Image: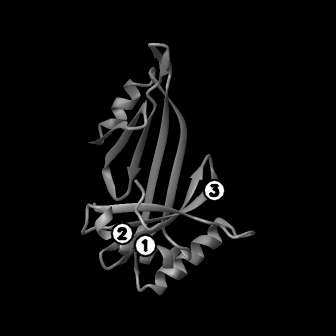
Amino acid sequence: MGVTVVFQWELVDGQTHQQAIQELHGRINNTGAVQEGKFYYESKFYQASDSSTTRGKTFSKDFYTLKTSEYPVTVFARVDDSTKDKNSCIQCDSPMESLLIKLREFFTPKRTFEIRGTRFKLADFWIRPGIVTSSGSNKCVTVEIEYTPSYFADDCWPLFSELGSYILNRPIDEKPPT
């Protein structure tokens, strides 16, 4: 794991998601990157069955899970604490599924998103373009870029900016996202 940023690909008028992926593969291949297999992500949104009220404010703690082929036995989860500055993140191995079954009466699964695609390796970078689907329909195209040697986005952002602007064919912000 290093610094990872996900960008959304802007579809050109009339362009299908599959055409966008083919264009991205061409641009990524032009950088000298090599295909290194497939990747898969599955994210589920769970909504609290009820909400609690404290001091006149309503709180509901929804949460999200993420499974990935990059870390097949690990499930990542984020609890939305209704406060923008305070979200709890956890990661655990396979028992998370059995925990979710036990929590069924408190949380209802609402939406599932999947991303599938081909991953590419370019020196210390992993590049993962994929199509986001939900309920069997394509929603958008994303490009995930991971730089493995660094854990600090500010330190490697010029590299992201250069590679990302070439692959996405548009300028990248001068500062990393928060």
Q: Which residue is mark 1?
A: 161
| Label number found at residue 138 | 3
Which residue occupies the extreme right position in the image?
14
Give the mark nearest the N terminus, 1 or 3. Answer: 3
Which residue occupies the extreme front position in the image?
174
Identity of the amino acid at label 2?
Answer: Trp
Q: Nearer the viewer, residue 102 or 49?
A: 49
How far across and how far down the image is residue 127, in percent? 42, 70
In this rendering, would 91 be left or right of 38? left
The residue positioned 64% from the left and 65% from the top of the image is: 17
Quadrant of the rendered image containing residue 31: bottom left
Q: Nearer the viewer, residue 36 or 149?
A: 149
Q: In the rendered view, tell whether residue 53 sits above or below residue 13.
A: above
Q: In the rendered view, tell whether residue 158 sits above or below residue 30.
A: above
Quadrant of the rendered image containing residue 110: top right
Which secondary structure lies at badge 2?
Answer: helix
In this rendering, would 81 be left or right of 167? left
Which secondary structure lies at badge 3?
Answer: strand
Identity of the amino acid at label 3?
Answer: Asn
Q: Which residue is mark 2?
A: 157
| Label number found at residue 114 | none
